[in-house]
Image (cartoon, helix red, strand yellow):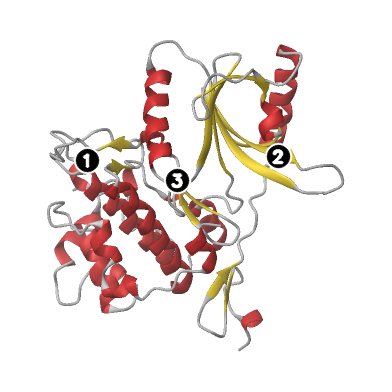
């Protein structure tokens, strides 16, 4: 069978054993297009020109005020709209007649009373400037406009989120899922090695380029680990990600948040391969989770995980989804397992492009 005849259509397996992803560029919904037009019109009524960058947290604060569009172009699409934030796709055109443009994702947080915005700025600036990795979203600049709103300018991932891809495809082939999984583990391992926990890992917060590079994104809730690396005395809020939340977090037990991140990554692998979550909540009220606890150490294992394929693969997923966090495998250990060591990552994933 030729590579053109291979299924699924969003991956091409090459004759040398490598592969490349063919992910459709994310298209805006009609509502988001209307929101973008409304936002642009609303902004133009409030100010006579583009929002002005008054202070950059990335490049220093001594520069002259500069229209935002001079650096990053204009908003052409709304990617997300919330009560106090929105994410816009900005396009900056290159010199005339070149026909080229540079795309940026810009998250805007509107000024709010209290200290939250300033506290967020310090945390986000520290994390985004400290961590640089092909599989972690790159933040280009944090800056304030003339209204005091915080703009975070990031690289744009045209493939959308992993969740969006799965909604389109249902599930992924082993080659696709393995490639994405290894990239995701690399990004998470880099965060953990730097003393950072994500705390909100889920398919919606994993972005893809159209070539198939995976980017750990949405670091708003990420935190620095305590310097003494002691377990947290109590679990923090699961942040509305219940299906991906580890049992120790739901139970409010003392825990190492890195282990909770690993749990979420293990859940995402099963989602990619099976097209469904293993359970709705890792608690006593969920029959599938209770079934998993009863069978995970049986000779025949948990049937749903056993469907994933090789024994080495299943063993790693079992180790990532160990209900006892102190026994759970780390991201680094998972990466160095025999199974994941053998996984081939696409060229785009290696380069982060």
Q: On the image, which quarter does residue 308 sit in? A: bottom left
- Asked whether the beta carbons under mark 2 and mark 1 sit within 8 Å of each other, the answer is no
Residue 238 visible: no
Q: Which-is-in-front pick, marks 2 and 1?
A: 2
The numbered mark, 2 or 1, whose residue comes first in the sequence reads 2
Residue ranking furthest to the right:
97
Up-down: is 185 above or below 112?
below
Residue 263 percent coordinates (x, y): 27, 53
Which residue does the image show at 67% across and 32% down from the upper left?
71
Up-down: is 31 above or below 18?
above
Instruction: Please name the residue that numbered disc 2 is placed on.
Output: 91
Which residue does the image show at 75% across and 18% down from the upper left?
49
Residue ranking furthest to the front:
62
Mark 3, secondary structure of its residue = helix
Mark 2, secondary structure of its residue = strand
Q: Which-is-in-front pick, marks 1 and 3?
A: 3
Instruction: Please name the residue that numbered disc 3 is placed on.
Output: 205
Mark 1, secondary structure of its residue = helix
Q: Residues within 10 Å of mark 1 (few under 14, many from 20)?
A: some
Which residue does the image show at 17% across and 67% down from the upper left?
295
Residue ranking furthest to the bottom:
1
């Amino acid at each position: 069978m030729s590579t053109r005849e291979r299924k699924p259509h969003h991956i091409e397996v090459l004759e040398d054993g490598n592969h490349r992803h063919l992910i459709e560029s994310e298209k805006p919904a009609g509502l988001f297009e209307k929101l973008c037009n409304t936002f642009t019109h609303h902004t133009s009524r409030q100010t006579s020109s583009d929002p002005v960058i008054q202070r950059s947290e990335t490049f220093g604060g001594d520069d002259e005020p500069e229209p935002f569009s001079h650096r990053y172009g204009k908003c052409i699409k709304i990617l997300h709209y919330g009560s106090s934030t929105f994410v816009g796709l900005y396009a900056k055109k290159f010199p005339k007649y070149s026909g080229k443009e540079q795309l940026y994702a810009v998250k805007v947080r509107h000024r709010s009373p209290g200290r939250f915005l300033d506290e967020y700025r310090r945390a986000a600036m520290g994390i985004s400037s400290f961590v640089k990795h092909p599989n972690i979203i790159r933040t280009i600049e944090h800056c304030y406009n003339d209204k005091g709103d915080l703009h975070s300018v990031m690289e744009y991932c045209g493939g959308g989120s992993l969740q969006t891809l799965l909604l389109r495809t249902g599930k992924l082939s082993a080659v696709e899922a393995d490639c994405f999984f290894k990239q995701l583990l690399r990004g998470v391992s880099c965060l953990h090695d730097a003393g950072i926990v994500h705390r909100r890992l889920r398919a919606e917060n994993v972005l893809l380029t159209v070539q198939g590079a995976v980017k750990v994104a949405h670091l708003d809730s990420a935190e620095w680990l305590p310097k003494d690396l002691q377990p947290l005395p109590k679990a923090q809020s699961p942040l509305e990600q219940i299906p991906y939340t580890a049992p120790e977090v739901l139970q409010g037990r003392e825990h190492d948040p890195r282990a909770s991140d690993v749990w979420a990554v293990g859940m995402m692998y099963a989602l990619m391969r099976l097209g469904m979550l293993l359970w709705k909540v890792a608690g006593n009220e969920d029959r599938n989770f209770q079934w998993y606890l009863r069978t995970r150490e049986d000779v025949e294992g948990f049937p749903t995980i056993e469907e994933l394929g090789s024994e080495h693969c299943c063993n790693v997923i079992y180790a990532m989804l160990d209900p006892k966090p102190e026994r759970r495998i780390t991201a680094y250990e998972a990466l160095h397992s025999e199974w994941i060591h053998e996984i081939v990552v696409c060229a785009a994933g290696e380069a982060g492009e």
